[in-house]
Each structure stands twice: as structure tokens, then as C-alpha cells.
Amino acid sequence: MQGYEFLTGIEGENLNMKNESLKTIVQIGIVVKDIEATIAAYADFFGVEKPQWFWTGPQEESKTIFQGEKTEARAKLAFFDIGSTQIELIEPDHHQSSWRRHLDDQGEGPHHIAFIVEGAEGKKTILEEKGFTVQQQGEFVGGRYSLLDTVKELKVLVELLEYDK
């Protein structure tokens, strides 16, 4: 792929940096080995209270798909709202997932940047047509997410978040 033509000149539904939904990174996801220790470190660094971590839902609730296959993967999550950006800490379980792969292959660190979008299916289709595959997708109470493999070009995954209206 030459340059980033996919960001401009798409007819029909446009998915580019002029699109308000992709101008603001709303979340940075960070994969960690020990969520409790990392929560303590972030809370101390930012001088805020420690949030409580929680498990993602089981497969029947989350409908998690990793590389096209259902997975029982779950993760402990904790969120810090820092200014206009949310930091999501993710400690994956042992099942195959985007989170587990990242931890096993690259260790702890940045996993994704997230954008809130409307019409996620359409935007996902546009990105897939540009060669960005869906690595993982699933649901959560109040919405859904798709993690697209943009690592080669952007050095991090892109997550599309869509909330129910």
C-alpha cells in the first residue's frame, strides 16, 4: 500500500481524517501481565483513585471472535479517564485472543487506539477493502468493538467502538 490514500478520496461513506469520528482518539489500550500492579502504578502516577478491574463477559455474552473463530477468551479490564482520553488496561486470560497474542509476542505495552464511530460495519468494510483485516471483534454491555490489524502501517491496532443508541 502506497502512502495513506485510504484516508482520502473514498466515494460514498467516507472514512478519513476529515471524518469527525476519526479525529479524536478516545482510548489507548495497554496489555499488561498484572492488572492490579499496573492499576496501582497508574493511580499513583496520575494521583487518582484506583479503579476496580472487572472481567469481560463470557463467550455467550461477548460473542468474541478472534481471527474468524469463536474464542472463550476473556480479560480483566480497568479504565482510567484522563482528560478526553481513556486508558484501558487489559490483562488477558490464557485463551487465544488479540490481547493474548500481543502479550505473548510483544510483551506488555500499547495494544490499540480507539475511535467511537457510528455505522461501524460500513467503516469496517471500507477498511477491510483497503487490506486491514479484523483481528478480533465482540460485544460488551451497551455496544460492540472491532480490532483491525493496522500494525504494519500504524504500528498499533485500531479499534472501532460503536455504542447502542
Image (spheres, rainbow, N blue to C red):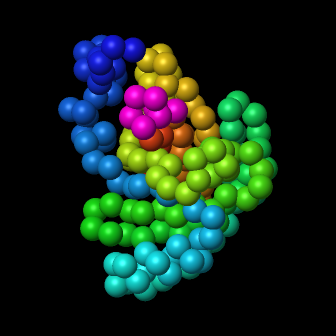
Image x and y of residue 80, in percent? 42, 70
Q: Residue at x 59, y 71 (%)?
A: 35
- Quadrant of the rendered structure where residue 83 is? bottom left
Q: Is residue 69 visible?
A: yes
- Quadrant of the rendered structure where residue 2 is? top left
Q: Is residue 44 covered in magenta?
A: no
57 horizontally vs 165: left or right: right
Q: Is residue 158 above or below residue 134?
A: below
Image x and y of residue 16, in percent? 28, 28
Q: Residue at x 33, y 60 (%)?
A: 85
Q: Is residue 163 above or below residue 88?
A: above
Image x and y of residue 122, in percent? 45, 27
Please, which residue is most extreme toward the left here?
A: 18
9 horizontally vs 28: left or right: left
> Quarter of the image containing the N terminus?
top left
What is the count of numbered marks?
Answer: 0
Please, which residue is most extreme toward the front here?
A: 106
Q: Is residue 83 above or below residue 114?
A: below
Q: Is residue 65 above or below residue 142?
A: above
Q: Is residue 158 visible?
A: no
In magenta, the rendered stretch is 149-155
Image x and y of residue 17, in percent? 24, 33
